[in-house]
């Protein structure tokens, strides 16, 4: 079923001109690794996700790893250390995607992890810790309205599973798990114990323009922005588009339009790190000759600190309530996701920055991530650090996403150097760090 991979075979083929991790992302960029025939959409526990895990597991095997799927549907490859069963350095990112996605968001971090292990295995090099490469199943929240479900399961921060939540087809998470041979009652068993891990490293495209503007291939993340995701519902009254006078309407879509303009204004008037986005809108009943009676839309609010995010959230909620009151429509704002700002671990980050300097010959550029990452969830389990790769014009969540092969090669070398440096310090002993 799977076509022959269009890249060189062999244990360690990462190269400056032709990066195997980049080629592998390209290979995974379309059907059957996408749920859509046009472009890329890989939803959690979809047929494309299953095909992707099957292919990636083969690459993990080839690289010298034993593989398993955990109870949350994450794909995990393990490369033993000098002592079998030793705690592991986790290298991860996500395999799911947004709709009409780019090919590198998430997937490249997993492919780079595999490449690093392939290189170590080819040299017969074992470390004082094991390495586990994790392809997380759900980071984006693009199938169910609850992002980072699977890293939260691994980090042990998921108290209860929203089993009744439904995807766009109305199928519950409960049923989707069953259809994929996963037992909802065992989902939380994916959790690691802190003593099983020594740290978490994630490589990811920057998804912003900073590194490109600075002329740098890689950078080191210091922190990940705080984010909220809400579902906003406006309840108006559906009516006949021909007979209902304008003065008597309770148009839920007109109210939503006004709300969106207010959200944009509040986001734009805040500090530069504040962003507020409406990315999804559903209109009911959704006919050209019916005054809309119901709308729901997503609201995503982020900032470098929880304080700025929360202040903007209060302003937005007040503005939306005023609009609803003036128009006489109902309003509900439901919090779906609350991710606090996450600092990366200072010691691991310093170690990663030193590797960047050794490999590139330049001081490491430090930056804050506005995008969310599995690392922000994993920080509750273990010390985390993140390496960013330049991406063209900062474009992401878009099929035009592009990375350079030489940057992926640099990232591969930095990750390898980091792992070796980390192994020579006592830093990999969990007691040396607080997460
Ligand atoms: C994930 O890509 C996010 O930042 O929403
Ligand atoms: Mn993404
Ligand atoms: Mn991502």
Image (spheres, rainbow, N blue to C red):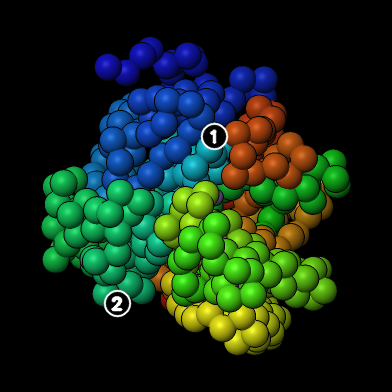
Q: Nearer the viewer, residue 211 or 307?
A: 307
Q: Nearer the viewer, residue 170 or 55?
A: 170
Q: Check the picture and name the quadrant holding the N terminus.
A: top left
Disc 1 CB within 8 Å of nearest ligand 2 atom: no
Q: How many marks?
A: 2
Identify the residue under disc 2: 159
The residue that appears at 77% across and 53% down in the rendered structure is: 364
The answer to which quarter of the image holds residue 104 is: top right
Q: CB atoms at circles 2 and 1 under 8 Å apart?
A: no
Q: Say what secondary structure mark 2 lies in.
A: loop
Q: Position of residue 336 (x, y in %)?
A: 44, 72
Location of residue 328 with respect to 286 vertically, above or below: below
Q: Say what secondary structure mark 1 lies in.
A: loop
Q: Position of residue 185 (x, y in %)?
A: 14, 66
Location of residue 129 with respect to 79 vertically, above or below: below
The residue that appears at 56% across and 29% down in the rendered structure is: 22
The numbered dot on residue 285 is none
The residue that appears at 36% across and 25% down in the rendered structure is: 32
Q: Can you name the residue that lies furthest to the front here? A: 243
Q: Is residue 401 visible?
A: yes
The residue that appears at 49% across and 57% down in the rendered structure is: 290
Location of residue 345 with respect to 90 vertically, above or below: below
Q: Position of residue 151 (x, y in %)?
A: 39, 61
Disc 2 CB within 8 Å of nearest ligand 1 atom: no
Q: Residues within 10 Å of mark 2 (few under 14, many from 20)?
A: few
Q: Is residue 398 left or right of residue 164?
A: right
Q: Is residue 198 left or right of residue 166?
A: right
Q: Residues within 10 Å of mark 1 (few under 14, many from 20)?
A: many
Identify the residue under disc 1: 103
Q: Is residue 128 visible?
A: no
């Amino acid at each position: 079923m799977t076509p022959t991979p269009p890249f060189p075979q062999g244990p360690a083929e990462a190269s400056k001109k032709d990066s195997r991790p980049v080629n592998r992302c390209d290979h995974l960029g379309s059907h059957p690794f996408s749920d859509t025939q046009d472009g890329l959409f890989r939803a959690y526990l979809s047929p494309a996700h299953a095909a992707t895990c099957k292919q990636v597991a083969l690459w993990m095997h080839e690289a010298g790893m034993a593989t398993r799927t955990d109870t949350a549907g994450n794909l995990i490859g393990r490369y033993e250390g000098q002592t079998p069963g030793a705690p592991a350095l986790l290298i991860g990112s996500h395999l799911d995607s947004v709709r009409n996605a780019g090919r590198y968001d998430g997937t490249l971090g997993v492919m780079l992890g595999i490449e690093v292990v392939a290189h170590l295995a080819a040299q017969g090099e074992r470390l004082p810790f094991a390495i586990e490469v994790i392809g997380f199943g759900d980071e984006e929240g693009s199938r169910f309205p609850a992002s980072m479900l699977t890293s939260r399961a691994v980090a042990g921060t998921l108290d209860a599973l929203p089993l009744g939540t439904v995807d766009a087809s109305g199928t519950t998470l409960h049923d989707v798990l069953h259809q994929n041979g996963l037992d909802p009652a065992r989902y939380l068993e994916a959790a690691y114990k802190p003593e099983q891990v020594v740290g978490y490293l994630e490589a990811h495209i920057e998804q912003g323009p900073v590194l490109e503007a600075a002329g740098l291939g890689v950078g080191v993340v210091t922190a990940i922005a705080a984010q909220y995701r809400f579902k906003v519902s406006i309840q108006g009254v559906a009516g006949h588009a021909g007979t209902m006078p304008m003065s008597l309407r309770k148009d839920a879509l007109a109210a939503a339009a006004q709300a969106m303009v207010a959200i944009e204004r509040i986001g734009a008037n805040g500090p530069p790190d504040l962003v507020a986005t409406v990315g999804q809108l559903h209109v009911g009943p959704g006919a050209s000759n019916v005054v809309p009676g119901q709308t729901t839309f997503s609201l995503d609010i982020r900032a470098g600190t929880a304080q700025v995010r929360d202040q903007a959230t209060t302003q937005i909620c007040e503005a939306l309530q005023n609009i609803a009151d003036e128009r006489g429509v109902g309003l509900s704002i439901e919090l779906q996701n609350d991710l606090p700002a996450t600092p990366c671990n200072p010691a691991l980050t310093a170690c990663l920055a030193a590797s960047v300097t050794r490999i590139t010959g330049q001081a490491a550029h430090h930056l804050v991530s506005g995008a969310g990452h599995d690392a922000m969830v994993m920080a509750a389990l273990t010390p985390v650090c993140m390496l960013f790769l330049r991406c063209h014009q900062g474009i992401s969540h878009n099929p035009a996403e592009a990375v350079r092969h030489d940057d992926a090669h640099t990232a591969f070398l930095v990750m390898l150097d980091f792992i070796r440096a980390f192994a020579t310090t006592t830093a990999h002993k969990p007691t040396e760090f607080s997460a």
